[in-house]
Image (cartoon, rainbow, N blue to C red):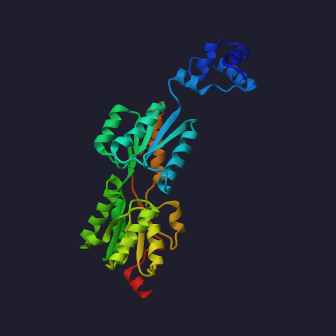
Amino acid sequence: MATIKDVAKLAGVGVGTVSRYLSGNASVSPKAGKKIASAMAELQYRPNSMARSLSSKRSDIVGLWVPSFSGSFHRKMLQTIERELRKRDKHIILANAEDSQNDEERIKCLDYLIERDCDGILMSCPELSVIQLAKIEARYPKVVFINRDIEELIDKTFCANHYQGGRLAAEHLIELGHTEIAIVTGRMNAQDAISRHQGFIDRLAESGIEVKPELIESGGYSFELGRAATQRLIDKGIPFTALFCGNDNSAMAAISTLNEQGIVVGKQVSVIGYDDIDLAEYASPSLTSVRIPLEEISINACHQILNLCYGESLPIKTRFEPTLSIRNSTHSVKQLKNK
């Protein structure tokens, strides 16, 4: 196996020159650089990543912290970020807090990434408080937060306007004539879930519509919790013509559960989801959903971590507006009654 000394000998330069070339040091002349590159190709030399990181004082690795690897939302985020980093020869280390029961355990996931010498860290952290995030940023400045809205850290927080997303869902149901409405919420200890729920409730209230407390159930974000929450609503026997779910997993589980109980979605009840994941249009019936531009959010967050860690000057946008994708799972009250 070729060594750095072999490369230096073949290129006719010193070992120190090869080392500076590998670290990206601009002091290496173009002529010497060409000789070194040619020698590396001829010898099929691959630089030791550990030695290179010691020389350049960076690892070319970015950490990604997410609350869970399950579900389409975070998979999309991961795929987008990994693709953007790979374009610039950077790599990713993952950590998730799926089994964490408190903030202390969640912070340990961050420590895991820091201990692995990540150049910077991207965090999707809906359950950590603003105070906790401020402490993290003070301790580790090369951090960017995804799906959080913190005015004091506006250039390091990338998110959609979830309050407006909730209002869009409510507006759609109001336009369809619905007044008997049920809700399966997301995790109500998370900022995004609280914001979309409040936006939904506020817009309904502006039209004189109040959701009965008995028709609000917590569903988390999984298929299982969405199914269980929908079944609890059905078991109460309180009529509703529309159901708003905190994410698309819950909404698709709700469609399945309602249909199994003989309540046909699109004919007897309308269901609207949130996020507009790729599977939403393939549900049966296809799911009306509030679209969060997750790919754009992830790309911009990734650009900012590249700016912070590697001196790039990529343009960024930090705030994004949701839109509504209307499909077959929602119909007007009049249409429902006629079916």
Q: Quadrant of the C terminus?
A: bottom left
Q: Residue furthest bottom?
A: 338
| Number of on-image labels | 0
* Residue for point 31% across, 45% down: 150
Q: Is residue 324 visible?
A: no
Q: Is residue 54 visible?
A: yes
> Eyeballing the image, is 38 above or below 163?
above
Q: Residue furthest right?
A: 42
Picture coordinates of residue 332, whole percent (x, y): 39, 79
Picture coordinates of residue 197, whole percent (x, y): 32, 62
Please name whichever residue, 148 or 72, is drawn nearer the observer in this view of the structure. Answer: 72
Please name whichever residue, 104 or 30, is drawn nearer the observer in this view of the structure. Answer: 104
Please name whichever residue, 129 or 18, is drawn nearer the observer in this view of the structure. Answer: 129
* Residue for point 51% across, 39% down: 93
> Eyeballing the image, is 42 above or below 245?
above
- Which image quarter: residue 269? bottom left
Picture coordinates of residue 86, whole percent (x, y): 57, 40
Q: Quadrant of the N terminus?
A: top right
Picture coordinates of residue 88, whole percent (x, y): 56, 36
Tell whether 102 sits left or right of 91: left
